[in-house]
């Protein structure tokens, strides 16, 4: 019903917010206003979560950096693999997405280098090996990924431009 009202007789205006995000403001004849926030373009809306995950590198922002950690956790998603890097060893795991949830499909694979932060990497592997609900926040220029699970604290990641080499400069 709302869609037919919007496309039949409504005033449309594109707004730029303070954060330079674009919004579509729709004003109906009766004065009712609706605001729609722009999100990154996705070719296949049926597979929206998977497509958006693959578009960026995700940098964890939900933990305080300690002296034990060399760099924040970085994740790249491919069609069926999660690729992780937390400062020493690269890790990967097969996954699939169902109903806005990441479901691990195999054990982690990892390089094995002895580093000062191996406890941190083991903790990451343990946290990421559980099913997690996916939520996105679009209030910033690049989206924020929120992973929620009943097994661990919520993990928050900021999208950054895609990097194939996960080591930060």
Image: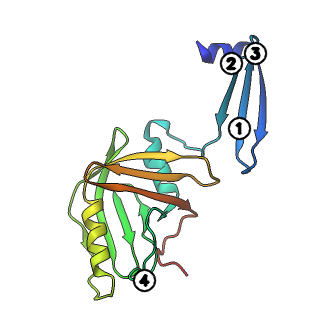
The reply to whether dot 3 and dot 1 touch (C-beta < 8 Å) is: no
Q: Quadrant of the N terminus?
A: top right
- Closer to the N terminus: mark 4 or mark 3? 3
Q: Badge 3, how many Cα within 10 Å: few under 14, some, many 20+?
A: few
**Looking at this view, is 12 or 153 the one in front?**
153
Of discs 2 and 3, which sits in the foreground? 3
Q: CA distance from mark 2 to mark 3?
A: 12 Å
- Closer to the N terminus: mark 1 or mark 4? 1
Q: Which residue is mark 1?
A: 23
Q: Residue at x 52, y 53 (%)?
A: 144
**Looking at this view, is 121 or 80 the one in front?**
121
- Closer to the N terminus: mark 3 or mark 1? 1
- Closer to the N terminus: mark 2 or mark 3? 2
Q: CA distance from mark 1 to mark 4?
A: 41 Å
**Residue at disc 1, secondary structure:** strand
Q: Residue at x 33, y 87 (%)?
A: 116
Q: Which residue is mark 3?
A: 31
Q: Which residue is mark 2?
A: 6
- Closer to the N terminus: mark 1 or mark 2? 2
Q: Residue at x 52, y 78 (%)?
A: 168
Q: CA distance from mark 1 to mark 2?
A: 15 Å
Q: Which residue is mark 4?
A: 67
**Looking at this view, is 1 or 144 the one in front?**
144
Of discs 1 and 4, which sits in the foreground? 4
Of discs 3 and 1, which sits in the foreground? 3
Which percent across, then down, holds residue 2? 61, 16
Quadrant of the rendered image containing residue 110: bottom left
């Amino acid at each position: 019903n709302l869609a037919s009202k919007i496309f039949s007789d409504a005033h449309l205006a594109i707004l730029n917010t303070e954060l330079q995000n674009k919004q579509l403001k729709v004003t109906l004849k009766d004065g009712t206003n609706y605001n729609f926030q722009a999100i990154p373009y996705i070719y296949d809306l049926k597979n929206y979560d998977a497509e958006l995950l693959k578009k960026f590198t995700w940098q964890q922002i939900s933990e305080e950096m300690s002296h034990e950690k060399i760099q924040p956790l970085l994740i790249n998603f491919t069609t069926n693999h999660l690729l992780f890097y937390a400062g020493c060893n690269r890790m990967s795991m097969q996954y699939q997405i169902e109903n806005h949830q990441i479901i691990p499909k195999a054990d982690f694979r990892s390089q094995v280098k002895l580093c000062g932060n191996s406890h941190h990497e083991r903790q990451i592997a343990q946290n990421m090996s559980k099913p997690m609900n996916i939520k996105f926040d679009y209030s910033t220029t690049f989206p924020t990924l929120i992973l929620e699970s009943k097994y661990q604290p919520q993990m928050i990641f900021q999208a950054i431009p895609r990097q194939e080499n996960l080591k930060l400069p």
